[in-house]
Image: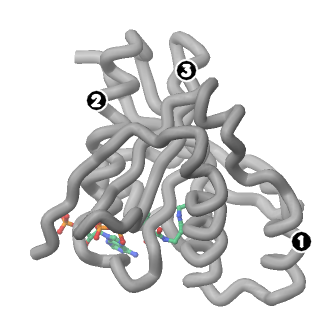
Amino acid sequence: MINIEIYQAKPEDGERLKQIAIASKSYWGYSEHLMGQWAQTPIITSELINKDIVYMACANSLIIGWYRLLIRLPVAILEDLWVLPDYIGKGVGRKLFEHAIQQADLSGAERLELDADPNAEPFYTRMGCKAAGESISEWGRAIPHMTYNLQR
Ligand SMILES: CC(C)(COP(=O)(O)OP(=O)(O)OC[C@H]1O[C@@H](n2cnc3c(N)ncnc32)[C@H](O)[C@@H]1OP(=O)(O)O)[C@@H](O)C(=O)NCCC(=O)NCCS
């Protein structure tokens, strides 16, 4: 069991967080062409880190995953959730997701919403999310839109 600590991201973490997102998404075996196109987009910037809620999972002082939450009350949107391939399947995603739920709750949101990578849908279902239709991704494909109810 790895010891995971959660820290708020700082603007200077942006470049490393972008590299982690690219490594993480590559885990699903997408083509170099699609990944290369995506890597040309901002993904995460110091401005977004200042504006949104961005937290990182760290183990042994290394960043191994992160998430970004947007507050658009009554909704909180989980815009990013990435774990480095070497750490996938070790409880890091759960820890980050549960932290994001806490932050969404603290912000007063009634529900969390997200557009899931189709490969990650079983993870979100396990976390308690429900499928709620489809969204069209930046790659033009239909992907699951999911919600998590925060109202007690
Ligand atoms: C999706 C992702 C964030 C999940 O993080 P993770 O660290 O691998 O997940 P965890 O190890 O914390 O798993 C949490 C739970 O979900 C379950 N789970 C994870 N993936 C699953 C799958 N494909 N099918 C069924 N259950 C799954 C685990 O068994 C675990 O259950 P438990 O805690 O009750 O034992 C991670 O796989 C990832 O970064 N993938 C690549 C990038 C990506 O797709 N990000 C999401 C973009 S929307």
Graded by Cα atoms within 10 Å as few (under 14), some (14 to 19) or many (20 or more), the crowding at tag 3 reads some
Secondary structure found at label 2: helix
Q: Say which amino acid is labelled 2.
A: Gln
The residue identified by callout 1 is: 37
Q: Earlier in the sequence, mark 2 or mark 1?
A: 1
Q: Marks 2 and 3: in contact by CB < 8 Å?
A: no
Q: Does the residue labelled 2 lie within 8 Å of ligand 1?
A: no
- Distance (Cα) linking label 3 and label 2: 13 Å
Looking at the image, in which quadrant does ligand 1 appear?
Answer: bottom left
Left or right relative to 129: residue 21: right
At a point 79% along the width and 55% down the height, the residue shown is 137
Q: Which amino acid does label 3 sit on?
A: Ile
Q: Mark 3 points at which residue?
A: 71
Q: How many labels does the image show?
A: 3
- Cα–Cα gap, marks 1 and 3: 28 Å
- Residue at image point 46% right, 31% down: 112
Among the 4 quarters of the image, the one containing residue 66: bottom left
Vertical side of 118 occupied by 110: above or below: above
Say which element carries label 1. Answer: helix
> Residue 67: where, in percent of width, then height?
48, 48
Mark carried by residue 94: none
Where disc 3 sits, the SS reads strand
| Residue 99 in view (yes/no) | yes
Give the labeled residue for mark 2: 102
